[in-house]
Image: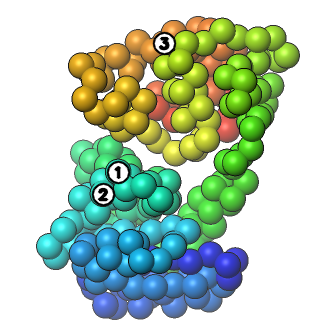
Amino acid sequence: MSKYRILIVEDDENISRLIEYNLKGAGFDCYVAFSGEDALESLSREDFDLVILDLMLPGIDGVQVCKTIRKSAGICDTPVIMLTAKGHEVDRIIGFEAGADDYVVKPFSPRELVLRVKAILSRANSSNKGKDVLEFNGIKIDLEGHRVFVEGKEVRLTKIEFNLLTTLFERRGRVQSRDRLLDEIWDISADVTTRTVDTHIKRLRKKLGKAGRFIETVRGIGYRFSEEAGN
C-alpha cells in the first residue's frame, strides 16, 4: 500500500496525528493540511490517491473543499472520505451531495477508518478507467463504438443515457448526486432540473432490463451503481 498517497485535512492536531499514525502503520504515505486553503493548495501542486477531509475547518469548510475537488480538472475523481463530528442524516446528505465517497463520524475507530480507506482505494484501483471496453456482470460498454450490450444483446441508448450509464459504471460503489450528474452530463447551463435525472434513470433501467437493478437510488441524494444488484 506504500504507493498510495493520502492527504489528511484536519485542523485538530491530535486527531490528525492519530490518523497519520494509523495510516502510516498500514503502509500509506500521509500528508497533513490544517485548513481548507492549505488542502486545495496541496492538491493543486501534488497528486494524492485519497483525501480524508474534516467537515469543520477554519476558512473554507470541508463541504466547499469537496465541491471544489469535484469541479476541478485532474482531481475531480479523487476519492474523499468526510470525517466529522456531525452524525445527523441531514449532515451525511450534505456530505454526499458535495461529492464525498464515504462519511465517518467522530469519535471513530482508527482501524475502521484504515479499512474504509483500503476498500475505497481497492475499488478505484480495480476500475476499468483507460480501457476501450468496460465489462461487469453481463454488461459490456464499448466506449469507442458507443454501444452497450447486456448478456450479449445490444441495447440501444441515447447519448444522455449512454453517458449516464458510463459515469455511474466508472464510479461504481460511489454515490453520485443529481446535481453533480446534471453538471457533468447535461452541462451546468442546461435548462433542466433534478427530475430530468430521475426520468432518464428510469428509462435507462427499463432498457437495461434485469441489469438495471445495479443502478440503486440513494434516497435524498442521487444514484449509485452497485456491485450487487438491488431489488
Q: Secondary structure at mark 2?
A: helix
- Find residue 7 and report its horizontal and vertical position in percent: 45, 77
Q: The N terminus lies in which quarter of the figure?
A: bottom right
Label 2 to label 3: alpha-carbon separation: 29 Å
Q: How many marks?
A: 3
Q: Is residue 149 above or below residue 132?
A: above
Q: Is residue 173 above or below residue 29?
A: above
- Find residue 223 and report its horizontal and vertical position in percent: 46, 32
Decide: few, some or many residues near mark 3? Use Cα within 10 Å; few <14, some 14-19, many ≥20: few
Left or right, residue 158 beside residue 192: right
Foreground disc of the pair 2, 3: 2
**Colouring scheme, one of rainbow, by chain, secondary structure, one colour:** rainbow
Q: Secondary structure at mark 1?
A: helix
Q: Disc 2, disc 3: CB below 8 Å? A: no
| Quadrant assignment, res 13 | bottom left
Q: Disc 1, disc 2: CB below 8 Å? A: yes
Instruction: Say the numbered circle drawn on residue 68.
Output: 2
**Residue at image mark 1:** 71
Q: Is residue 47 above or below residue 183?
A: below
| Quadrant assignment, res 24 | bottom right
Q: Residue visible at 72% across and 24% down?
A: 145
Q: The C terminus lies in which quarter of the figure?
A: top right
Q: Residue visible at 55% across and 12% down?
A: 158
Q: Amino acid at mark 1?
A: Lys
Q: Amino acid at mark 2?
A: Thr
Label 1 to label 3: alpha-carbon separation: 26 Å
Instruction: Say the numbered circle drawn on residue 202.
Output: 3
Q: Amino acid at mark 3?
A: Lys
